[in-house]
Amino acid sequence: MKKVFYCFLLLFSHLAFAQEISLEEAFQIALQNNWNTKILQNSLQIARNNNFAGNAGKLPRITLNVADNFQLFDINQQLSNGIEINRNGAVSNNLSTSLRIDWQIFNGGRVWALQERLQIVEKNSEIALKNQQQQLLAQVAVAYLEIARQKQNLKLQQTLLSINQERLRVIQKRVEVGTANQTDLSLAQLDVSNQEQIIRSQELAIRQAKIQLNLLLAQNADTPLDIKENITLKENLQIESLKTSLERHPQIEIARNNFRNSLTFEKEAKAQKIPSLSISAGYSYNRNNSTAGFLLLNQNYGAFVGFNLAVPLYNGNIFDRQYQTAQLQSKSQELEYNRIKQEIQTELERQWHNYLIAKEQYEVEITNSQNAQEYLKVMEKRFALGQATILEIREAQRVSEQIENRKIQSFFNVKLAEIQLLLIAGKIEIP
């Protein structure tokens, strides 16, 4: 008995402290916790770190060199004037320092092409992160809606259970007074038992749907949570507005940037045939002293400046072929961009028609549901008055259940189509 009480208490605590979250709150949790999002955020930061003028070669290089060498040696020298020097253990010291600046002034525009390429890499990293966030939010929205759908189905099944229990109560009274037979009673009991089993299965479906949402939120599968079921349809979706936003679709943006990136390779290949100019300047100091030998001290110091001009004349037409290859790659990237753009536009049109059909079906199911509910109420009154058999009331209930299920499903079909449209247009709002 204590074990049963403990299990009940544990279950009650689990439900009592379940976190009730809105869809916007689920979005925030997912964006904060999702592993793929964190990885792409790091990738974006890496791209930003790499995108600076110095990495593109636009800034000068400043180098300070210091070298100090000591040497211990034996010396044997015979000079032209007849002097002879012999000494063991002589010491010499050679000190050399220089401060040097090297700057490539012009290299045919390759520096600017590389700078543009670094900017494109950073932009593509931003788009990839945004695309991941949009995809994640769409998945979270679908999982959130699935919980809401299953909970709506649970409410429907609980309502049907109440109807079955009321019908069982009526039949039990009729059996007691002799106006109903045992067959009707057994059938009513079977309906109640089956409905209770359906409810248990429905509760399991809700738990599984919550596990899926926890997975997307990067939380433990058994983390208690619940949702706020105030889900409404968007009333202001317009195809023209969605088409306008289509240029911001991540795949289209990345394809467009890849085409721009291929043009930078063209510029770089073409720049190899153009002369390049670099300058250098600095200050140097050299000092060499020795305790023996002909030269005991030698030092020099001063500033220096120079330039280097490189003019490519001929290298076996390698640069020409590289430029032709870069042009072909640019044409391929342009074709790829146009292909992706056309496919996304076609997908938007297809999803828009799916959305319109889903809305139309939902409106039809609303009317059907109202009629089915009225019909069921009439049959319940007739059954209570003994004017309808149990088979007739069961058939009315079956029809009502089917229509109500279709209405619930059609509502969520509209929401799913709505999410797909917003995802294609890149308009899922990031909190």
Image (tube, grey):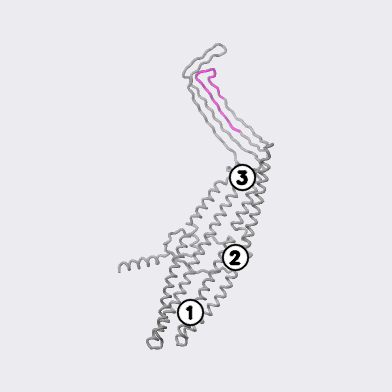
Q: Nearer the viewer, residue 328 or 142?
A: 328
Q: Earlier in the sequence, mark 1 or mark 3?
A: 3
Q: Position of residue 249 (x, y in %)?
A: 60, 58
| Labels 1 & 3 near each other (Cβ < 8 A) | no
- Label 2, on which residue? 351
- Image point (54%, 30%), residue name: 97
Q: Earlier in the sequence, mark 3 or mark 2?
A: 3
Q: Nearer the viewer, residue 8 or 401?
A: 401
Q: Position of residue 254 (x, y in %)?
A: 60, 54
Circle nearer the viewer, 3 or 2 = 2
- Label 1, on which residue? 397
Q: Is residue 167 above or below residue 151?
A: below
Query: In the image, what residue type sits under mark 3?
Result: Leu
**Quarter placement of the N terminus:** bottom left
**SS type, badge 1:** helix
Q: Position of residue 262 (x, y in %)?
A: 64, 49
Distance of mark 1 from mark 2, alpha carbons? Answer: 35 Å
Q: Which residues are magenta?
A: 281-299
**SS type, badge 3:** helix
Q: Position of residue 31 (x, y in %)?
A: 50, 58
